[in-house]
Amino acid sequence: MGGKMHRHHLFWPLVVLGALLLFNLIYSPDFFSLAVRGGNLYGSLIDILNFGAPLILVSIGMTIVIATGGIDLSVGSIVAISGAMACLTISKGTDPSSVLLVIGAVLASIALSIVLGMWNGALVTVTRIQPIIATLILMVAGRGIAQLITSGQIITVSNSNYEYIGAGSLASLPFSIFIVAAVLLIASLLTRRTAIGLFIESVGSNPEASRLAGLRSRTVILTVYVFCGLCAGIAGLILSSNVSSADGNNAGLWYELDAILAVVIGGTSLNGGRFYLMGTVIGALIIQTLTTTIYMIGVPPEITLVVKAFVVLAVCLIQSEAFRKTLITRWKKRNYPAEQEVTRHA
Amino acid sequence: MQAPILQMTGITKRFPGVKALSNVDFRLFPGEVHALMGENGAGKSTLIKVLTGVYSIDEGTVTIENQAVSIGGPLEAQKAGISTVYQEVNLCPNLTVAENIYIGREPRKFGRILWNKMNKEAARLLKERLNLSIDVTLPLHAYSVAVQQLIAIARALSISAKVLILDEPTSSLDQNEVHQLFSIMRKLKNDGLAILFVTHFLDQVYEMSDRITVLRNGELEGEYLAAGLPRIELVLKMIGKDLKLLEELPKLSEEAGAAAGSIMITASELGRKGAINPFDLEIRKGEVVGLAGLLGSGRTEMARLLFGVDRPDQGKLLAGESGSPVKSPRSAIELGIAYCSENRKTEGIIDDLTVRENIILALQAARGWLRPISRKKQDEIADQYIKMLNINPPNPEHLIKNLSGGNQQKALLARWLLTEPELLILDEPTRGIDIGAKAEIQKLVLSLAKQGMSVLFISSELEEVIRVSDRVAVLRDRSKVKELGGGELNQQQIMQAMAGG
């Protein structure tokens, strides 16, 4: 029974997340406490979910791209562009508190994100540029596009309806959590209830054999980049609405790297093939918890990245079966030095 | 007679579960071209890898110029005077010609590379030994594959020059390039070099080689003088048949003619440069057409054209009753064609998926992603085919990569049978499968044909081809040379056509 649990793909990510939470609990006993203020729940756990929402969204899209054997480096830039587009639309409106204006802004951002995803997908499928280079183009140029939209300024908006997306509450929980849940649900249904999940895994695992089995691999690949762009776009909306402003330079900075990390921690191989959406969500939560922990225990800001790097390295090593095996063999050898001696002489 | 420069005696090489070479003798004389022949799994490449130090030897000895040597790795092989040029040129395309020839052994002074000296020597080497005057300062990729091949030979010569192994050097060259290579091989031979020549082209074997060694199933079949070994004898020795002992095997397929229905697929003057010369082929409904030919004769290339995997550069291919052209694998599938590839690892199975997912993949692809096959239906299908084809272990949730080759093959067969094709192309469907399963697959093919399915059956095993086929098309050296049917369909006729000449 224990052996079976061991082999489940969510086992190690959950262990790591549990260990992080346990550390927090020991360090600050009121970490798990939730308070109700003004009808809304407050607490560190809620913060992790709330602030982690954009990363989870981006990571979900990234998972599906990586499953096809690709990668999308441009998600951070799409986050910035989407936020900039929404804030620009709202700031240009005559009635800054109108609901219609917010809907228009959201639709414009999402449409733009889809177009950007198509651009990535077209570069990969039509011009056959390697995904890492194809998306690097938008990663770099995207920051410029975001600056262009905001004219190099930070656009600040004050529209309570727009704020609701990233800072509002529903049933005493942050609204962003519901957005993430909805996207996760849709992604799970699409990939597990239709055949698209099978096609993605097939194309990612063996593109040539998939072609010979009659799969339209180009369409599949184009679709995953569009979906990834869409996820990044929604993340951009949450992020910019949370602070009621759009910063073309810094919004979503390094998100692509955190997202890739979340995917890998979640158990999806960078070589493509099998993918695990729930694993990715846990991976993203691990990263967000880690960030919160580092702030909470008061690591000096100049070394937070180094601390984060070491924890991530440890997480990756724990997940690696080869590493665990080596560790165990070493441990056993150390316990029985005499036995080793005998075999060496024999 | 001179003493052999290279003598291998009693070479045995085991891999887990297989004896790749058992007690093989091989010798090479200076100033000769020696062809090494054998079908798939005969042990040719193992012998070459043993000789070049890629594999270690389990038993046996190697002597070079009467000195026993032990070859521990490719570097030691080079030091012993053995150099190899492989089919795919393995040089660095973005380095210059001279750099490629001298890489790792550049002439230096105080650690500085003497570029001028290197370029001059490279040019001189190519001119003197290979009659090739080219600019050695250009990158390798500026030259054709044939010239790259010669540069690889030049590199081999500059390292050591006693034994040169050419492993299928001609398979990616056109006629003129082959002639150029041959004239250089003759020159090197006259210079006293011993050349081991591996090729699948019978014509080239007889054009170039003085002596032929035939391997079969990891054992030495014999060493012969090329002049004293008729082609048909060579083919018989490679396949392991004795002409006198050939009996007519009971034929399972019914006589053609009566069963032949409307035309399923027509290829006219279909061809692709470097793959297969233009051919005509017609397959009718309910007919089993066999493809016979030695390894490398163009069987797989023909199948790939018919399924739209590769694009033909000439000719026409029409499929189905409507006579639509085949543009891609997908359009082929839509026209009712299925293709079970010979390379199941790279072109067949999807490693990461389960047996069930692998089986339903082609059908699901044809249905599109919006019409998924329900899980219940998938389980039914998987169970049905696992039972029908006897797939082991009979667990549809096993990852396919953990199955044995034969069982992977059966799962792939299931994938295509599920699409209910009108024409099924089977490329070596029984390779690596045990005898019982082989007979099952042959029976299955015949029963499918009876139900009206057309089958193109490709196999190295002649008995099998003859047993199931109504008609057999014979390929030699990438051309379709003959089509045999009815009374002419026997092993002797086929082998005569395979050997040609």
Image (tube, rainbow, N blue to C red):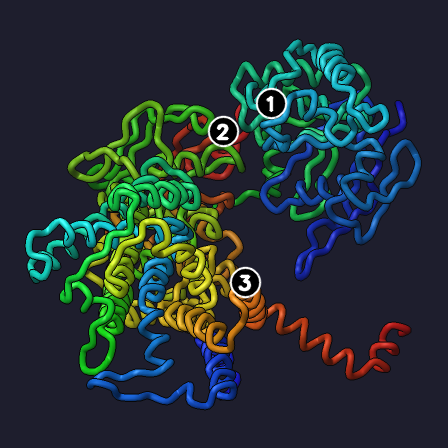
- Indicate the amino acid at tag 2: Arg
Q: Quadrant of residue B314?
A: top left
Instruction: Identify which residue, B62 or B480, lies in the foreground.
Output: B62
Whichever of callouts 1 and 2 sits on the residue coming sooner in the sequence is: 1
| Chain containing the residue with disc 1 | B
Judged from the image, the secondary structure of the residue bearing numbered disc 1 is: helix
Rendered residue at 34%/83% (across/down) = A43
Left or right, B458 with respect to B37, comes to left
Of circles 1 and 2, which is in front?
A: 1
Left or right, B87 with respect to B218, comes to left
Q: Position of residue A262 (x, y in %)?
A: 43, 65
- Indicate the amino acid at tag 3: Glu
Residue under numbered circle 1: B140
Q: Which mark is residue A302?
A: 3
Label 2 crowd (10 A; few <14 / some 14-19 / many >=20): many
Q: Quadrant of residue A131?
A: top left
Residue under numbered circle 2: B476
Label 1 crowd (10 A; few <14 / some 14-19 / many >=20): many
| Chain containing the residue with disc 2 | B
Tell me the distance, in whole angstroms, between the alpha carbons under discs 1 and 2.
33 Å
Instruction: Identify which residue, B409 or A234, lies in the foreground.
Output: A234
Judged from the image, the secondary structure of the residue bearing numbered disc 3 is: helix
Q: Is residue B288 visible?
A: no
Q: Which mark is residue B332?
A: none
Left or right, B454 with respect to B435, comes to left
